[in-house]
């Protein structure tokens, strides 16, 4: 894991690479993904099954694409009771958080202030999406927590049908994935992953229904597929590899910081883990501790590759500079492991989620805190937000004018229509004024 000091050439080069990380991860695989999307759109289930066998090494008869109720019931028998209780607790906390947010944000009809004008009613209706697809990764690990995070806010929003896809494994879908889907209210589950799953959800096949929106993280191929199907469907975000930036000083135990860096690096080799600190001695201590902890990690090779390839310890002169760098990176996860963390919160402009204080590790947010762990990555926190109930609703503008109210704006419409060369616009007003 490299250690870089502000002002040195390598420091600025590294930051420049990090700021361009979305381009590095997506564009070079676009041609292959386009081909897969086209095949699924044209050939449907046939292409889905072919690509599933090619990429996942699993041959599935078309009649077994959908997971049946009996398999879900058997999943409950395979999940240890202690973990089942944890899944239920996490589901309850995630649901409670998203319900509390939705009550503040989304009444079903909102009247605008202009609705007070005589003869005029203006407002918006809030409606949930009808069908949503959630993608759950299943490559190097299985993620029941992601099932809960993706499906529960959709359910809270009132989505009519939730369809889930997840890559098949030779030994079958993880029972915890199936149980989490059942607890979260998923309606249909299909054993398909990769770009072919995104294509099936976007365009529909004989077996898999098309949806209105696709949410959930995935690898670079899945992220690219989501970007390319946007327009046929909506998507939540084009997610990249997992990220964490930690701002910490000597008052935080080095072992805490090292463990949090590793918690992101173990996701995959392209994960991004960065420590920003004002103390070079502390940075070196964290680096030593990271090597020590890696030696007893099951996913040591993955985490070590991530930390060596993309990780860094950045040494800066003061906390103001540290905050500036964090805002520049706009990370998925930002830990402020400092005694004055709360007072620094107002200075943070860009982050998917913020973890305040020494005893708020990123892992608590991944699993059971309540707020969503599906977050913008690759700098997208500059303009996008965590997955939430608002991702599963749409707004419909509503307006009503009486004839007398319309008359008050006749000349304004005429002037606009004349300027823009749209004669028919004004005529639609004029003809109503002639009718008594």
Image (tube, rainbow, N blue to C red):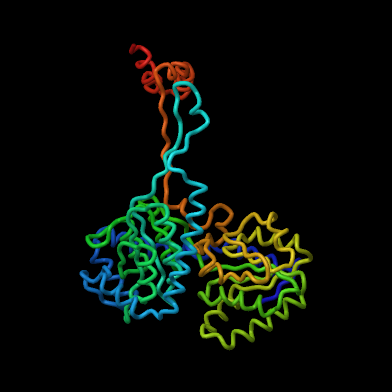
Question: Quarter-wise, where is residue 154 in the image?
Answer: bottom left
Q: Is residue 220 visible?
A: no
Q: Position of residue 9 (x, y in %)?
A: 72, 68
Q: Is residue 302 or residue 152 the one in the foreground?
A: 152
Q: Is residue 256 left or right of residue 120?
A: right
Residue 201, by quadrant, is: bottom left
Q: Residue at x 51, y 47 (%)?
A: 105
Answer whether residue 329 is visible to the viewer in this image. yes
Q: On screen, 182 above or below 57?
A: above
Task: Identify which residue is drawn at 54% across, 84% down.
Answer: 300
- The residue nearer to you, when weighing 248 against 68, is 68
Residue 1 horizontal/vertical position (percent) = 64, 78
Against 78, residue 397 (above or below) is above
Classify 68 as above or below 383. Answer: below
Residue at x-position 71% and y-position 63%: 341
Residue 27 image point, x, y percent: 47, 62
């Amino acid at each position: 894991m490299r250690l870089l000091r502000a002002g040195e050439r390598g420091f600025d080069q590294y930051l420049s690479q990090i700021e361009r990380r979305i381009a590095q991860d997506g564009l070079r695989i676009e041609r292959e993904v386009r081909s897969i999307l086209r095949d699924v759109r044209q050939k449907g289930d046939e292409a889905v099954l072919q690509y599933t066998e090619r990429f996942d090494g699993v041959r599935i008869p078309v009649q077994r694409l959908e997971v049946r109720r009996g398999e879900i019931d058997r999943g409950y028998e395979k999940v240890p009771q202690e973990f089942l209780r944890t899944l239920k607790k996490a589901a309850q906390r995630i649901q409670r958080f998203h319900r509390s947010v939705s009550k503040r944000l989304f009444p079903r009809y909102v009247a605008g202030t202009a609705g007070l004008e005589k003869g005029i009613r203006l407002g918006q209706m809030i409606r949930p999406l009808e069908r949503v697809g959630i993608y759950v990764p299943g490559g190097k690990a299985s993620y029941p927590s992601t099932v809960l995070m993706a499906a529960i806010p959709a359910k809270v929003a009132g989505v009519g049908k939730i369809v889930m896809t997840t890559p098949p494994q030779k030994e079958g879908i993880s029972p915890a994935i199936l149980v989490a889907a059942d607890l979260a209210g998923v309606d249909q589950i299909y054993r398909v992953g990769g770009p072919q799953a995104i294509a099936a959800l976007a365009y529909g096949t004989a077996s898999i229904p098309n949806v209105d929106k696709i949410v959930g993280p995935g690898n670079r191929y899945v992220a690219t597929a989501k970007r390319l199907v946007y327009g046929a469907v909506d998507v939540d975000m084009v997610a990249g590899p997992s990220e964490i930036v930690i701002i910490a000083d000597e008052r935080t135990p080095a072992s805490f910081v090292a463990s949090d860096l590793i918690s992101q690096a173990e996701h995959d080799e392209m994960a991004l883990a960065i420590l920003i600190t004002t103390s070079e001695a502390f940075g070196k201590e964290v680096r030593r501790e990271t090597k020590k902890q890696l030696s007893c990690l099951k996913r040591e090779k993955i985490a070590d590759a991530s930390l060596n390839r993309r990780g860094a310890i950045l040494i800066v002169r003061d906390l103001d500079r540290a905050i500036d760098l964090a805002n520049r990176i706009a990370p998925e996860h930002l830990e402020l492991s400092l005694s004055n963390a709360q007072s620094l919160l107002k200075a943070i402009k860009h982050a998917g989620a913020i973890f305040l204080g020494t005893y708020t590790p990123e892992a608590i947010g991944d699993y059971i805190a309540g707020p969503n762990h599906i977050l913008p990555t690759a700098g997208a926190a500059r303009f996008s937000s965590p997955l939430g109930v608002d991702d599963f609703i749409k707004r419909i503008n509503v307006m009503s004018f009486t004839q007398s109210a319309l008359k008050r704006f006749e000349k304004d419409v005429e002037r606009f229509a004349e300027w823009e060369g749209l004669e028919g616009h004004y005529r639609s007003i004029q003809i109503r004024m002639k009718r008594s």
